[in-house]
Image (cartoon, grey):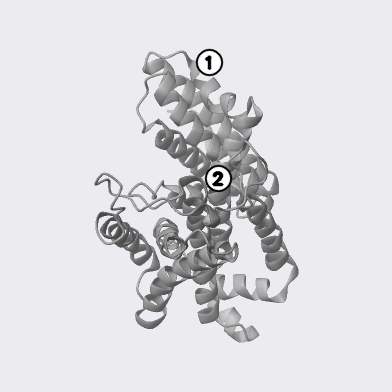
Amino acid sequence: MLQLELRPQASNLWTYASPVLALFLTVLLGVALFMALGKDPLRGLQMFFWEPIKTSYALGELMVKATPLLIIALGLAVCFRSNVWNIGAEGQFVMGAVCAGGVALLADKDTGRWIVLAVLLAGVLGGMFWAGITAFLRDRFNANEILVSLMLVYVAGMVLSYLVYGPWKDPAGFNFPQSKTFESVTQIPRLMDGSRVSVGLLLGLLGAGLLWVFLFRTRAGFAQQVGGLAPDAARYAGFSSRKALWVALLVSGGAAGLAGALEVAGPIGQLTPYVPAGYGFAAIIVAFVGRLHPAGMVFSAVLMSMFYIGGELAQSRLGLPKSITGVFQGLLLFCLLACDTLVAYRLRWVSKKIGSV
């Protein structure tokens, strides 16, 4: 029979092979799911893995979805590598969108293009402020950052709803709960005509490069990780675990807020109750599938965006429920958790001995 046996040390091979195996198992489970729902499994897989990449326009839309996922995941990687569990990136994303939207609403047709930088900065500061609440409560009162950051997600959603149903509602919007459409001067610059891909993609890739340098080539990055993982060792080495907490949460919140600003001043162009798209939660999966490594998260962000687009296509073309996107995301996460067992354990066949009577 098969038995799990503890490895003498973690397997480098399975550290990187585990996400690949998890994706393979997710595809197999997806096939079984489509068959159980009475749908053609090949047609279903085509919605998720071929349709999002078959044309240049589709690739552009894939990058539009991947951009916020990547930016948020990069910030979360700093937290998780520091042993700080920020589960509330969705709320920081929303507050970044709210602050960015507030600045965008101040613009008029005569405002200069500098307003774009002001919008992005407002988004970053909004996300940092929201994450700073968690950092303060953890630092001052030793509150659990998982619960605090998660609960603040719902508070952020209520703040957004209050604004778009109340003081920021568009008076010419036929009573729909939404702000007025932002002036074109606040629009995030796009990389090419005929595509919605914005400079946010370049910011995400630049952020991945900067994160790699910070984590693996600077003393500050080393201190950041030690300060979170081993506070006693950090203090002995002269590093501050308290500083690691604040840096992790502020960087993570700022990244999520930047993603929110890019979203409302880019593809959406206004504030609506539907700004929360689940990117903050999906980015947690992106971070771990990418092994908390900047290069890995670039690829996992693209994969997760394929799930988003595939879910939308499956809903419109195959008549599947909207929740199919979340199902695929959950399958990938659980398969990854299962496959990660092989990092610390190996499977060994043990012959069952029959004792003599």
Residue 198 as seen in the image, left or right of residue 30: right
Residue 102 as seen in the image, left or right of residue 345: left
Residue 269's tag is: none
Label 2 sits on what residue type? Answer: Asp
Instruction: Answer few, some or many: residues within 10 Å of disc 2's Cα (few below 14, many 20 plus, some between 14 and 19).
Output: some
Instruction: Answer few, some or many: residues within 10 Å of disc 1's Cα (few below 14, many 20 plus, some between 14 and 19).
Output: few
Q: Is residue 301 above or below residue 239?
A: above
Residue nearer the viewer, 193 or 56: 193
Residue 26, position in %: x, y? 51, 31
Q: Which residue is mark 2?
A: 340
- Please state, as top left, top right, bottom left or bottom right, where the C terminus lies in the image: top left
Label 1 sits on what residue type? Answer: Leu
Residue nearer the viewer, 54 or 238: 54
Could you tell me which residue is drawn at 48 percent across and 36 percent down? 308
Q: Which one is in front in this view, the residue at disc 2 or the one at disc 1?
A: 1
| Label 1: element kind | helix
- Farthest residue in the front direction? 110
Residue 42's tag is: 1
